[in-house]
Each structure stands twice: as structure tokens, then as C-alpha cells.
Image (spheres, helix red, strand yellow):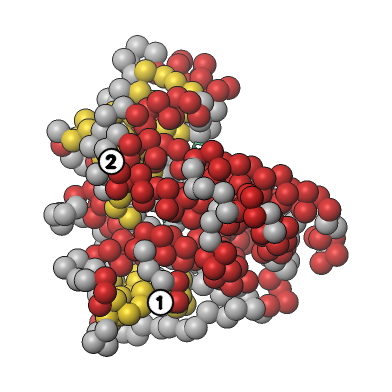
Amino acid sequence: MRKISIFGATGSIGQSTIDLIARDPEAYDVVALSGGHNVSRLAEDAIRLNADVAVTAHNENLPALRDALSGSGVEAAAGENAIEEAACRPADWVMSAIVGAAGLLPGLRALENRATLALANKESLVTAGPLIMATAQAHHARILPVDSEHSAVFQGLVGEEMDAVERIIITASGGAFRDWPMEKLAKATLAQASSHPNWDMGQRITIDSASMFNKALEVIETKEYFQIDPKKIEVLVHPQSLVHALVGFNDGALMAHLGAPDMRHAIGYALHWPARRDLPVERLDLASVAKLEFQAPDDARYPALRLAREVMAAGGLTGAVFNAAKEIALDGFIAGEIGFMDMAGIVEETLTVLGGDQSLIQAAMTLDNVRAADHMARVRAREIMRAAPNLIAQQG
Ligand code: NAD
Ligand code: MG
């Protein structure tokens, strides 16, 4: 039996992971599951999968979690330290599916304990790519990408030499507002931004898809994971979300990865790697698809893509600042404090203000320094957001 843990088990990726392992319960020995406020879901899955421990991120949820687990033999725990402790428990395979920078610490601990890390939490690579890759190397642990585009690239590279790779193209659906006129974008509502045309995902990544911040994070994720020159990374809008990525080689060949938009493919690939196993995903009927559509991304519509290029050029801890500022701006949009198009402005302003602080940005890439940069960026982004309280009113 393989020992496995799932961080972010109650979320979209976590639930898809559980869907796959629950189909073959004899194969897996579940060590830890973590969640947030959805205590009943966490407890129900922990009992069903007979986990050793269930951890909620929030201390105030501990009594409810204890109640829900009473008599089951599953241990209850709460808080960031408890998540860290759970990630230190021996496991063969760990799913990193917490959303946001909070996913970095358990991922690092899992790697230090030599688990294979199935990495959905792209923020780990954006905030601390060199640190997480070096940790994996130092402990002879493997990281397998779970983001659909990165899983697709990874599969396209099997048996290939990186020297022969001329370019990596990751596709973007264009999100909820691809076809909206630019002038309407500023007034896009939370409900409109929270519905994705092709993928069923958590709310935060769905909104990030509409703003292209998700693709911006993924460009950086591509650079860090595949250690490739940013100039060789391209973004291509592909509204159907059937081609997930393409790898271009020096002989002109382009290898594309196609599949239905269902994260259980990328999760299942990472779960069974290096083998391929039957997965419960739809098979594409290309004759009925008939046409594949592509278009170049529009820079004016998606400033996040330009910001990602600037972040990669600046290097150091700029990625941690970028991600943290994006998380605060996203919180602001979800809370109704700022408009949809204000998010990029707040992130850009935070990058400008903190980009001048060389002692912060060029500090060594340690966990403490990443956290310091993340913290400073959150403070500054909040100040910038508060200094412009009438953004929505002005647009109104
Ligand atoms: P989600 O919002 O559905 O779930 C997030 C999970 O993280 C939940 O279990 C939640 O309780 C937990 N969580 C939230 N804040 C936390 C905190 N501060 N500390 C500890 N736990 C916390 O998110 P999701 O859509 O499943 O995405 C998870 C990760 O996978 C993200 O990094 C996302 O970018 C990435 N990803 C998701 C998809 C997708 O299809 N959903 C695709 C590719 C990559
Ligand atoms: Mg993706």
C-alpha cells in the first residue's frame, strides 16, 4: 500500500484526488488530510478513507472537527503548525493542493521527508521556485506537476533532451471575459468572474483565469519547473481548452497534448507515474470537435502577462511579492472593495514600490526571506488598495 497525504483535501483538486483514490481503496494508506472551514467534508472524507489525522487550517474549527471525528479513531488537529507536522509524517506521495502561498510550507516539508510531491499549488513555484527545486534535489525527492498545462509539457518531454526544446507553449482559455468588450471589463461582477467556460475549479483560480493572473503564474511556474529561458515560453489563447500545452523542438516538430478539460487526468498521471492507468475521464471525439481554435493573447486586455515577464526579469524574491500582492488584490475584488481591472494596477504598484527595495528583493532565497517578502507585499498592497478607495465608485 502507498502512504499518501492530501493538503487542501476539501478543495476542487483535493476532491478530485479523493475521487481517484477512493476508486481503489486497497492501494492507498491515507496518512493526512487537510482542509479549511469545511469541517464536515474533511471529517467525512477522513473517516471514509481511514486517515491517521485530519487537520483544519483554522484553530477555531478544532472543537467542531473533534466532534465530527469522535469515536472514529482519526486524530483531529488545527493550525499552520499542525499542517506542517502532518506534512512531516512519512508518506510516499503527497498532493499539494492548498490554494495560495500557504501551500509552500507543507510542500517543502514533504520534500524534506522524501515524499513524491504532486504539485497543484503553483504558488509554491512562483514564490520560491529555486528553493523548492533545490529542496527536492537535496533530498532526492521528486516533484510531479499537476497543473494541466505543466503536466502536458511534462508528458511531452518524456524521452526528450531539454537542449532540443526550442519553445514551450501553454494554452489559456481566455477565461470568462475573453469576448467581452474592453470597456465593460472594469464593471465585471464577482459572480461573472467566478464562472469558467470550460473548467470547474475553486473560486480563486477561476477569477485568476478571467484576469489571466492564473496564466501569469503559470508562465513563471513553467520557467521554474522546467528551468527554461522565459523567452522560450509562449502563451496561446485556445478557447476550447482541449490542447493543454505544446512543446516545440529544434527540428520544427510541435508535440501537443490534448484531452478533455478534467483535472483528474493530470492528477491521475501524477498519481500513477511513471505508469499510465485507466482514468475516468471523457475521451475526445475529434471528428465532432471538428476545429481547434487559437489566437494570440491581447496584452491590453491582460496586463498580468506583461507583469509576469517583468517579474521573471527582476528575479530574486519578486515572485513572492507578485503572488502576495495578487492574493491581496483578489481578496479586495472578492470583498467588493475594488473593480476587476483594478487588481492588475494594485499588483503593478506593489511591484514598483517594493522593487526598489533591493535588500528585500535580492535577499537569499530562504523560507524566512520568502515569508518576509510575502508579508511586506501584503502590507503594501493593502495600503495601496486603501489609498484608492473610490476605484469602483469612479467606474460606476
Ligand atoms: P479550492 O479553493 O477549491 O481549495 C483550496 C483548498 O485549500 C481547500 O481545501 C481549502 O480549505 C484550503 N485552504 C485555503 N486556504 C488555506 C490556508 N490559508 N491554509 C491551509 N489551507 C487552506 O482551490 P483549488 O481550485 O482546488 O486549487 C488548489 C490549488 O491547485 C491552487 O494552487 C490552484 O492554483 C491549483 N490548481 C487548481 C486547478 C483546478 O482545476 N481547481 C487546476 C490547476 C491548478
Ligand atoms: Mg493550469
Q: Amino acid type of disc 2? A: His
Quarter containing the C terminus? bottom right
Which of the two discs, 2 and 1, sits closer to the camera? Answer: 2
In the rendered image of this protein, does residue 226 appear above or below residue 24?
below
In the picture provided, is 274 more to the left or to the right than 103? left
Quadrant of the rendered image containing residue 322: bottom right
Q: Which residue is mark 2?
A: 139
* Residue 18 seen anywhere in this rendered image of the structure: no
Quarter containing the N terminus? top left
Which x, y percent locates residue 389?
83, 54
Q: Residue at x 18, y 40 (%)?
A: 24
Q: Amino acid type of disc 1? A: Lys
Which x, y percent locates residue 390?
85, 58
Q: What's the mark number on residue 66? A: none
Disc 1: CA contacts within 10 A as few (<14), some (14-19) or many (>=20): few
Q: Nearer the viewer, residue 259 or 214?
A: 214
Which x, y percent locates residue 370?
54, 45
Q: What's the mark number on residue 232? A: 1
Q: Residue furthest bottom?
A: 252
* Residue 290 seen anywhere in this rendered image of the structure: yes
Tell me the SS state at disc 1. Answer: helix
In the rendered image of this protein, does residue 80 appear above or below residue 258?
above
Label 2 to label 1: alpha-carbon separation: 29 Å
Q: Nearer the viewer, residue 124 or 297?
A: 124
| Disc 2 Cβ-to-ligand 1 distance below 8 Å | no
